[in-house]
Image (tube, rainbow, N blue to C red):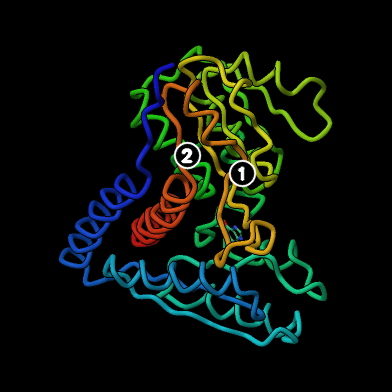
């Protein structure tokens, strides 16, 4: 059986970042303003610390004004809301990202709703969710992981996805639902599958495009994939070392890559597929937010 083409998310993300760096430099040249990103981390979750460090470093590498706020795990909700209020009013900050998950004593939805929609570079505010759902991509800020997944699909399949059968596995607000909205706007026939879906293997077998975003290691098996289909694996699952008797944790996706590679036409690896695109699209959203705020 022929082997799938491996979609190189690392290389595509690097080209997106290069493009953003030059556009950011051009903006600075024209207006004297650098796109400003504030990243807020509450607590010490190790995975979140890595993500936040990467976001901050990438913003700096793109020539942005980048500010990181690290708050103690026992920070009160009122203090966090107060910080967001200040960032909302800070003219040097065009994008605000509060890393999730937040500690249990803080109401996540209250925090996300306080961020000004035009600075909501995560695209999680109800205003941005509504604009995306209504098909107004030119005014919305679109969540980074689905936006990055769509870029990978278009680089693989070309600009026209019209009429393709797309199956999105997972119905989260961060990935599954916005991904389905984006694919619908590309005129795909979209199915959203989830944990209660009956006969998931046969639902997936009908798909020309599979986007797996359930957070379950290797749940999608190779023989579920229609020959030649394009597979975007959003899952990042850490398999602890002791389970395998080896020294290092291993990262796997939601798709059994070694099996699927013999069926798919193209597939993203984990790591090195969707992950790097998410951060690149955060930079794209921050640049977009800055340009809109500068009028
Ligand atoms: N935690 C996991 N994914 C994300 C994301 O896309 N944005 C934020 N803010 N937190 C996350």
Residue 193, quarter of picture: top right
Q: Looking at the picture, tell me which residue is in the foreground, 289 or 74.
A: 74
Per the model, the C-alpha gap separating discs 2 and 1 is 10 Å
Q: Which residue corresponds to the image point at 62% horizontal and 45% vertical from the top-left?
A: 129
Q: Position of residue 20 (x, y in %)?
A: 27, 55
Q: Looking at the picture, tell me which residue is in the foreground, 236 or 150.
A: 236
Left or right: where does residue 5 sit relative to residue 96?
left
Q: Within 10 angstroms of label 2, few (less than 14), some, or many (20 or more) residues?
A: many
Q: Which residue corresponds to the image point at 54% horizontal and 39% vertical from the top-left?
A: 233
Left or right: where does residue 12 sit relative to residue 272?
left
Q: Position of residue 10 (x, y in %)?
A: 35, 50
The disc, 2 or 1, on the residue closer to the chain's N-terminal end is: 2
Q: Looking at the picture, tell me which residue is in the foreground, 261 or 62.
A: 261
- Quarter holding the N terminus is top left
Q: Position of residue 95 (x, y in %)?
A: 46, 65
Tell me whether the residue at label 2 lies in contact with that at label 1, contact meaning CB atoms closer than 8 angstroms: yes
* Residue that mark 2 sits on: 149
* Residue that mark 1 sits on: 175
Q: Position of residue 117 (x, y in %)?
A: 56, 57
Q: How many marks?
A: 2
Residue 62, quarter of picture: bottom left
In the image, residue 89 sits, relative to residue 22, either above or below, namely below
């Amino acid at each position: 059986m022929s082997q799938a083409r491996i979609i190189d998310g690392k290389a595509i993300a690097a080209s997106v970042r290069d493009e953003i760096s030059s556009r950011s430099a051009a903006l600075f040249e024209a207006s004297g303003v650098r796109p400003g990103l504030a990243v807020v981390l509450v607590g010490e979750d190790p995975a979140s610390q890595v993500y936040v460090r990467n976001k901050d470093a990438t913003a700096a590498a793109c020539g942005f004004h980048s500010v990181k706020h690290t708050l103690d795990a026992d920070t009160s909700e009122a203090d966090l809301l107060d910080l967001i209020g200040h960032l909302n009013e800070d003219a040097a900050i065009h994008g605000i990202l509060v890393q999730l998950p937040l500690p249990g004593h803080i109401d996540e939805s209250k925090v996300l709703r306080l961020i000004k929609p035009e600075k909501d570079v995560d695209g999680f505010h109800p205003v941005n969710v509504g604009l995306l759902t209504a098909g107004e991509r030119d005014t919305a800020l679109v969540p980074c992981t689905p936006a990055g997944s769509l870029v990978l699909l278009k680089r693989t399949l070309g600009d026209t996805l019209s009429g393709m059968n797309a199956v999105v596995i997972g119905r989260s607000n961060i990935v599954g639902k916005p991904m389905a909205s984006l694919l619908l706007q590309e005129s795909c026939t979209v199915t959203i599958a989830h944990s209660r879906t009956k006969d998931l293997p046969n639902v997936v077998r009908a798909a020309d495009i599979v986007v797996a975003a359930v957070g379950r290691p290797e749940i999608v098996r190779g023989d579920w994939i229609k020959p030649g289909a394009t597979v975007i694996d959003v899952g990042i699952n850490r398999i602890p070392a002791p389970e395998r008797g080896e020294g290092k944790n291993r990262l796997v996706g939601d798709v059994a890559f070694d099996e699927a590679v013999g069926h798919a036409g193209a597939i993203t690896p984990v790591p090195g597929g969707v992950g790097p695109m998410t951060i690149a699209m955060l930079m794209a959203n921050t640049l977009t937010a800055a340009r809109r705020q500068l009028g």
